Amino acid sequence: MTTNLIRGKNRKGFVLLAGVIVFLLMTASAIFAVTSASRQQDRDSLLQLKEEQLKTLLDARGKLPPAVNTYIAAYKKAHLAAGSRDKAEQDSKKEHGEFKQAEASARNAMGTLTAGRGVGGGKVSDAIAQYEDSYLGFVDYMTGLVDSYPQYQSLFGEGDASCQGIFVGNKAANLSERETLLTEAAGICRNATEELGQSQNSTYAEYAQRVENRVGLMELDATSTAKAEENLKAFTATKDQLVQKVDEATARKASAEELLGLADEAKSLNKTIKASKSEFDFAAKRYTKTVKEMPSLLEDVFSKHVAGEMKHFDSVIPLRSTVLEAVIDDLLVE
C-alpha cells in the first residue's frame, strides 16, 4: 500500500515536470518566433529605408533649388514692377507657397526615415543622425534664402529704409556735411543690416555683417577727413601768422636767435601739416575703396558665397548617404 502511494506520487511529479518542460519549450518557441518576426520586420524596414526612403529624400531635396530660383525670379520681377517690398511679397505669394510645399515634403521625408523600424541605436542610428544633420542643414539654408530674400533684396533697394543713403556722393557741399549726412544714413542702414542679420541663412547674415563693418569704416574715415578739413583751416591761419612774423622780423632785422626760433616754428608746423595730410590721404583712399567695394559685396552673395555653400552640401550629403547605405548593408548580411 505504501509502495503504490509512493509510485503514485512519483508518477504525478513526472507528469507535472513533463508539463513544465513542454510549457517552457512552447514559450521558447513562441519567443523565437516573435523575435524572428521582429528581426524580419527590422530587415524589411532597413531595406525600405535604403531602396525607397533615401530615394524619396533625394527627390525631395532636388526640388528645393528650382523652387528657390522660381521664387526669387518672381519676387525680383514683382519688386521691379511695383517698387515696393510689401507689393513684391504679395505678388510672389504663389511661388513662396510652392517653395513651402517643397520644404514640407523634404522635412516630412526625413521624419519618415528617422521614425522607421530598425533605426534605433548602434551604427545605423549614428549614420542617420549625421545624414539628418546635413540634410536638414541644407533644408534650413534653402528656407533662409527664401524667407529672408525680401530683407536681402531691399538692403540697398529702397532708399528711405535701406543702406542706399550711405552713398552721399555730391549731396554734401564739404567733408563736414558729408560726415553729418553719412552718420544719419548709417543709422538707417544699421537697422536694415540688423534685420537681415537675424536671418537663419548664414550667407545673408554674414553679408549683413560685412556691410555693417564697411559702413563703420566709412563713418570712421568720414570723421577723419572732416577733421582734417577743419585742421587745414587752422593750419592755414597759423601759416599766415607765421609768414607775417617772419616778414616783420626780417624788416626790422631781428636777431639770428629770433629768426631761428621762427624757423623752428615753421618746421614744427610743416611736420604737423604733413602728419595731418598723411592721415587725410589714408582715410580718403580707404573711404573711396570701401564705397567701390560695396557692389562686389552684393554680387559675391550668390555668385560666390551661396555657390560655395551649395557645393559643400552637394559634397557632404551624398557622402553621408553612402555611409548610411554601407552601414545598412552590413546589418542586412548579419
Image: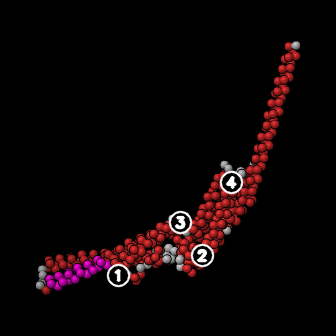
* Cα–Cα span, label 4 and label 1: 67 Å
Q: Quadrant of residue 230?
A: bottom left
Q: Which residues are magenta?
A: 229-249
Could you tell me if the residues under marks 3 and 4 are in contact, i.e. CB atoms within 8 Å? no
* Cα–Cα span, label 3 and label 2: 22 Å
Circle 4 sits on which residue? 115
Sequence-wise, the earlier of marks 4 and 1 is 4
Q: Percent position (x, y) of residue 205?
A: 51, 67
Picture layout, residue 34 above or below residue 25: below
Sequence-wise, the earlier of marks 1 and 3 is 1
Circle 2 sits on which residue? 91
The crowd level at tag 1 (other Cα within 10 Å; few <14, some 14-19, many 20+) is few
Residue 199: mark in rendering: 3
Look at 55% across and 64% down and name the residue there.
Answer: 200
Q: Quadrant of residue 93?
A: bottom right
Q: Percent position (x, y) of residue 85?
A: 53, 75
What amino acid type should be assigned to the residue bearing mark 3? Ser
What amino acid type should be assigned to the residue bearing mark 2? Asp
Circle 1 sits on which residue? 174
Q: Is residue 12 magenta?
A: no
